[in-house]
Amino acid sequence: MKSLCAHFAIWTMALIAATLHAQDATSSAPPVLRDHDTGLTADDLTAIDKIDSSEFKPGQAYGSYSEEVVENFLNQFVGTWQGTYKIATMRGDVLTRMEAQANYEWDLVDKTRVLKNQSVYASGDVIGYSSSVTYFWEGYLVTEVEQDDKKRIFLGIISEDGKSVNWSIAFATNKLSSSTRESFTTVDGQPAIKVEAYEEIRNGQQAAMIAMNGQLIKDDR
């Protein structure tokens, strides 16, 4: 399975293509986060060198945040979340549904404070895992999503009320259409994340747009 970003959606969208075309069923069990070494070093924060280079020109919409604004926004993610996603064509034809569980916690990498994520997705008998780190750097909100030894980097734009974020792919040489919006809300009094996203998926010379809608509820146990 990858995102996107997922912030949670970022790496989820990145997982979609693999989920739809997976051939090997690994387990029919519900998604459960697995324990493994997530030790990070400064070398793992690959976006930093790119942002610091003189070639980086992302546009005026990015790079205007204080570290306090970014950390206050990211604090809303801390904890464990569970929910479902629906993947569909742009016409609304449902392709698949996924159950998901995600955990977010703060860590310190060198001198950079990062929000670490470990996520697991289940669609039928297919189980997929992804991880991400999200952090503030030189005014930017950055997330790096990794799945199946592949990494994508996204930049975020936080809404004025601090309750949602729009993510866009950064540093792509062949940029496909992609957009993810995550919004914090409540469902039956419980904190929730609403995800709305679309992405262009290519298979050889063919390309298709898919949409994703999901909702994650915070597990306060």
Image (tube, rainbow, N blue to C red):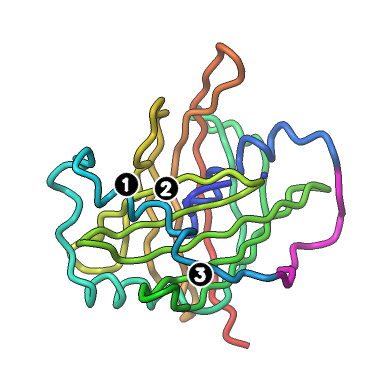
Q: Which residue is mark 1?
A: 50
Given residues 20 and 71, the one toward you in this image is: 71
The amino acid at mark 3 is: Lys
| Residue 31 painted magenta | yes
Callout 1: few (<14), some (14-19), or many (20+) C-alpha neighbours within 10 Å?
few
Q: Which mark is residue 31?
A: none
- Going from the N terminus, do you reach mark 2 or mark 1 first? 1
Residue in view at x 55 percent, y 23 percent: 202
- Which range is magenta? 25-36
Q: Secondary structure beneath disc 2?
A: strand
Please state the horizontal and vertical placement of residue 54, each as a whole percent of the image: 19, 42
Residue at 30% from the left image edge and 67% from the top image edge:
163
Q: Are marks 2 and 3 in contact (CB under 8 Å)?
A: no
Going from N to C along the chain, the mark reached first, 1 or 3, is 1
Front one among 96 and 115: 115
Q: Position of residue 69 (x, y in %)?
A: 22, 73
Up-down: is 150 above or below 195?
above
